[in-house]
Image: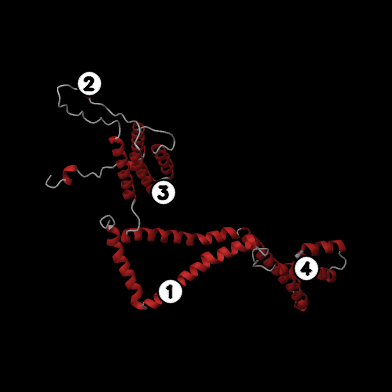
Amino acid sequence: RLRRNWYLIAFGLPSGAWMVYSLLRTHGGIDLMKMVYGKCRNIYREHIKDPMTSIYRELFTETGRINVADHKARIDAIESLKRMIRTWLDEYFPNMPEKEKISRAEAMDISLIETKFEESIKNIFEMNSIVRMGLIEMQFIKKEMLSAMVSMDELMGSNEMNMQVAAMTPALFLLMTLRRFFQVLFYALFKFGKSKEEIHAQFRQTMLDIERLLLMRDSPPGPPPSLSWGSKRDSHHDAPTKNISQTLSAEDLGMLLLHIHECRSILWQSRRRFRSVEIRNVAEDLAELSGERGPVSVSQQLMIISRMSRTYPFLKVVSSGIPFENLIPGG
C-alpha cells in the first residue's frame, strides 16, 4: 500500500511541513488558529448561512425578499414633482389650457422649464426664478435616481435565487474537494477502506471458490469397485458405476449460498467501486446462480459463471506487463 501511494508521501509530507513552518514561523499556532477560524466563519456566513436564509425567506415567508430601494420615497417624489410643475405652469403660463397643464404635470414634462431656465440664466435679476427652476430640476433628477434604484431592485429580486445559489457554489465545491481529499488521505495513510483493485480481486477470489465447488460436483464418477476375493464375481461389480448428480446436495448448496452471500456483501458494501449497470446485472446473475429464479443444474451454474467471466471487465485479470520468468526467483 505504501509503494502504491508513494507520491503522496514524496510530495505531501514535504509540502505540508513547509506550509506549517511558513504559517507558524511569524505568529505562532494561536494566531494561525484564529485566522483559520475567522476565514471559516466568513465563508460559512457569506456562502452558506446568508444565501440559505435569503432563499428560505423568499420561498416560505410572507415578507419575502427585503427591498433595497425605498418604493414609497419614489412615489412621494413623483407626486411632489407633479405638484411643483403644476404650480410653476399656473404662475408662468396662466393662459395655457387647463387640460394641457394637467397633461404636462402628469407626464412630468420639464421641457418648458428647461427653455425658461435657459432664457433666465442670461438675466441676473431673475435669480429667484432660476433657483426655483433649479429646484424643480433637482426634484426631477431625484425622481429619476429613485426610479433607477427601484428598477435595479426589481431586477435583483427576479434573479435573487440564482445569485444566492451561485454564492453557495464555491462552498459546495470546497466541501466536495475537502471530502475527496480526506478520503484519499485516510485511505493512503490510515488504510480506511480498500482500493478498487483489491475489491475486484476479492470478488474474483470468491467467484473462483464457487467455480471450484461446482466443478467438483459436476457429474463426478462413482466409487471404484470393491475387490473380489472369491472365484465368483458378481455381474454388478464388473463395471464401475457412475453417480450422475445434476444438482447440489444440501451441504454443497449451503456452501454455495455462503459464497453468494459473500459476493453480495462485497457488491453492496463497496458499490461505489462498481457501476450501477454492473451492480444490477451481477445481482441478477447471483440470483440465477443461487436458484432464486428457478431450479438450476450444476452445468447451468457453470455456464452462468462462464457468462459472468466473459461479460464483466472486473472479473478479468489484466496483465501487468511483467514477464512470468521475472517473477520466478533465479529465472
Between discs 2 and 3, the one toward the N terminus: 2
Q: Where is residue 240? Give x, y as percent.
A: 23, 26
Tell me, yes or no, if residue 55 can be seen here.
yes
Q: Secondary structure at mark 4?
A: helix
Question: Which residue lies under the disc numbered 1?
Answer: 35
Dot placed on the residue nearer the N-terminal end, 4 or 1: 1
Residue located 53% across and 59% down the image:
166
Image location (x, y in percent) of residue 267? 39, 47
Asked which secondary structure carries label 3, the reply is helix
- Neighbourhood count class around disc 2 (C-alpha, 10 Å): few under 14, some 14–19, many 20 upward: few
- Say which residue appears at 37% left-offset and 48% top-offset: 266
Name the amino acid, label 2.
Answer: Ser
Residue designated by label 2: 235
Instruction: Please state which of residues 241 and 97 is positioned toward the viewer in this rendering.
Output: 241
Residue position for label 3: 268
Q: Quadrant of residue 165?
A: bottom right
Determine the secondary structure under disc 1: helix
**Above or below: residue 64 compared with residue 260:** below
Is label 2 in a helix, a strand or a loop? helix
Above or below, 42 against 218 in this view is below
Name the amino acid, label 3.
Answer: Trp
